[in-house]
Amino acid sequence: MLKAIQILGSSSSSGCFSLPHRLKKPYSNFSLISRKPTEQTILKSSKSHPLAFQFRRISSFRALQMSHTHSESTPDGISPSSSSSIAIQSTVDHQGITSKINFCQSCGGATKHEIPDGEEKARAICTRCGKITYENPKMVVGCLIEHDNKILLCKRKIQPSYGLWTLPAGYMEIGESAAEGAIRETWEEANAEVEVQSPFAQLDIPLIGQTYMIFLAKLKRPHFSRSESSECELFALEDIPFDSLAFSSMLVTLKLYFEDIKVGRPKFHYGIINKRPGTSPSEIHAYTLDHHMKC
């Protein structure tokens, strides 16, 4: 990861990173309930610059159903319900999320939970076909949008953290890059077309099995409106509602940005947000930021 960051950084003339995007047409026809978009756009390399991308459309893309999903708009929290084609029982222990998968995703057979030979963690092992099911962290992507020295925030209109402010962000879809997902989420939540400028922060939250990738972005045109959000508003840095933010990840991201601006310009940040076990998503101050690195 750090080596890749250094490679990207060496190709930029204006800072650590430069990752321009060209969004030819806003995302459309996405269903957050069925998660079966009838139309999906993906990035392809532009001939004009090795790090520039343009969008092309492909039809009839169907997102792969995940074995264990939180709500599309509930990053940094555990959804009270999940959309899944298999039976899963989820609990949270002192080490993080422990999901109990009862049936095999391949053949539907019952599973047993044992530590496979050569491994250290208990896994769901199918008693019929022997397949082992592995669970992996979720990637949350979003944009920190700068416009006229202000930051665009969206007010959530669903639980958890209903009525609190957040950056436009959500879960990355199968078939898209992190930057593409951040652009899509911004369109879905704020009806805003943006151009990604550079990566700003990668924040891991082991307790809930999530990794955040936040990009700095600019509005392509000074237009935004509420869509999946109840409100969208530009805030001057001194007016950011730090006590009314939805998640710890948003608090950390905006604090890092605020600190960078005070001393010069934004940097790239990596860190681990360790949430205090047993706290709710709305307890945004119940964390420590560990292993913080910046460049």
Image (tube, rainbow, N blue to C red):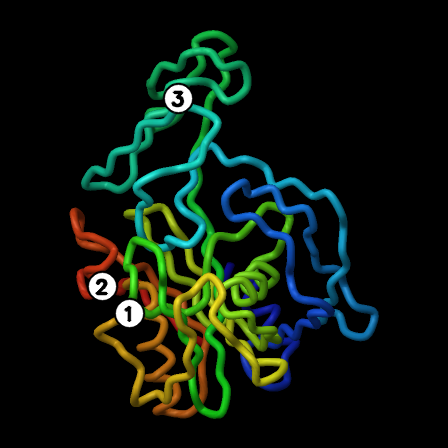
Q: Quadrant of residue 127?
A: top left
Q: Residue at x 57, y 85 (%)?
A: 222
Q: Name the residue beneath numbered marker 1.
A: 245
Horizontal arrangement in the rendering, residue 57 relative to residue 181 (left or right): right
Q: Secondary structure at mark 3?
A: strand
Look at mark 3 in the image and give the residue it sits on: 124
Q: CA distance from mark 3 to mark 1?
A: 37 Å
User: Which is more N-terminal, label 1 or label 2?
Assistant: 1
- Residue under the image location 43 percent in, 75 percent down: 232
Neighbor class of circle 2 (other Cα within 10 Å; few <14, some 14-19, many 20+) is: many
Which sits in the foreground, 195 or 259? Answer: 195
Relative placement, left or right, of 137 versus 259 is right
Give the x, y percent position of residue 192.
56, 73
**Up/down of 260 relative to 293, above or below:** below
Q: Are marks 2 and 1 in contact (CB under 8 Å)?
A: yes
Amino acid type, label 1: Leu
**Residue 51 seen in the current view:** no
